[in-house]
Image: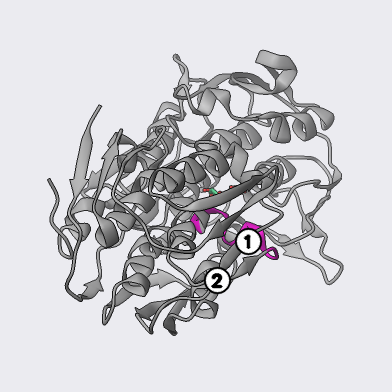
Amino acid sequence: MKTVTIKRYSNSFDLECSDIAPDKSISHRCAIFSLLSNDTSTIKNFLLGEDTISSLSIAEQLGAEVLRDGSNITIKPPKKLTEPNDILDCGNAGTGMRLYAGLLAGVDGSFILTGDKYLRSRPMNRVTTPLREIGAKIDCREEGNLAPLSIRGGELKAFRYNSPIDSAQVKSALILAGIQAEEVSYYKENLLSRDHTERMLRGMGAKVDIGEDGWIKIEPLVKPLKPLNIRVPADPSSGFFFAVASAITPNSKTIIKNVTLNPTRIEAYKILEKMGAKISFVEKENLYEPIGDIEISYNGKLSAVTVENNIAWLIDELPALSIAMALAEGKSVVKNAKELRVKESDRISTVLEGLTKCGVETIEHKDGYEIIGSSLKSSTINSYGDHRVAMSFAIAGVNCGMKIEDIECIDTSFPNFFDILSQITQLG
Ligand code: S3P
């Protein structure tokens, strides 16, 4: 198990990040959606993290020819997806497993999706239940809930599904199933979750449109889609660690370059702004979605905040936001966030355990928590194999010094995290 020690940093910094990890959600989708075309997709700045490399390897196992030149790749899909001669390993990636489940449910053949010990303990019935209802043949442990998932792909029925959870993974799985069904399908969620799937598939020529009533109309594919031609923007969730670092370090500033400004992805920055940090967004281009720079500056001590709306838009940033809350003036409250319990770790429990070790008073609820802002003290934190927990407490280390155990997981989403962190503090 690898550990890292982060030294407290007492100076200010001015960081310009043009090498924040490429977006994980979009990279997964590039690997998977390229299989829906009959032409070669060109992807620049693909995330070379373990999670997305797993999705790319699965695309190869299904018959795609992948040419890699660093983070620039081309994916030539097979004429027809081939039945692989081995299991398909999604690693730590919930996105990979759930999206591939939706795609493969409609593909002729037998497929087994598995993952690491963390992924094998995360709920899959959120996708297997609606997929089984439309005729998918999926078998797995705990009556459809735990991977490995054994899928026998075949014909799927059209559906009208009002999802009980706001989850882009569930939505994407159902859209991938819907475009393979024979008739038009409809999908609805209470709050629009990240919408990369809809934007990218539309860009490729699919008819996936959201109506004014919130129902997404999914039309069956009548011909193969156009290939992707995309440069993956930086990942706002990865950039957010450095946003928090500058918001808690006097006289500091970070610019995150070429990041997606998709409104479903930047809500945590808006909360940090509400807490008092100075933040500006500058849109520079629109390629499938808006892309630009985000600048975050220290602007005095942060104030406490209550976070209870649009939770799906900041769910991945809550661990890092909790570090900012721990240093803010007053009591911060997070509500309606029970989804945190089924992420790469139970993030309510792992984040609060870490904060308690750092001397912060917290109150745990079933679907959220409260943090009494004060100061942080140096401690030793176990990441429980969760990349975002590891990186959040590494950022806390900039403020007070920290030892983090089990840091290999950071490679799932942000392989150069420590290269950037070492520009603002010393690592041991
Ligand atoms: C993701 C969707 C979110 C997010 C995850 C990536 C995606 O999960 O937490 O890190 O790429 O679709 P849910 O859709 O399950 O909320």
Q: Is residue 268 above or below residue 286?
A: above
User: Gap between marks 1 and 2, in whole Å?
Assistant: 8 Å
Camera-nearest residue between 241 and 230: 241
Q: How crowded is mark 1: few (under 14 residues within 10 Å), some or many (20 or more)?
A: some
Residue 171 screen position, x and y as percent: 69, 48
Residue sitting at x 17%, y 54%: 7
Residue sitting at x 85%, y 43%: 159
Q: Is residue 146 above or below residue 336?
A: above
The amino acid type, in three-letter code, at marker 2 is Ala
Q: Which quadrant of the view contains residue 89?
A: top left
Residue range (magenta): 308-317
Residue sitting at x 59%, y 70%: 305
Quadrant in which the N terminus appears? top left
| Residue 417 included in the magenta stretch of the image | no
Camera-nearest residue between 377 and 343: 377
Residue 151 screen position, x and y as percent: 64, 20
- Label 1, on which residue? 333
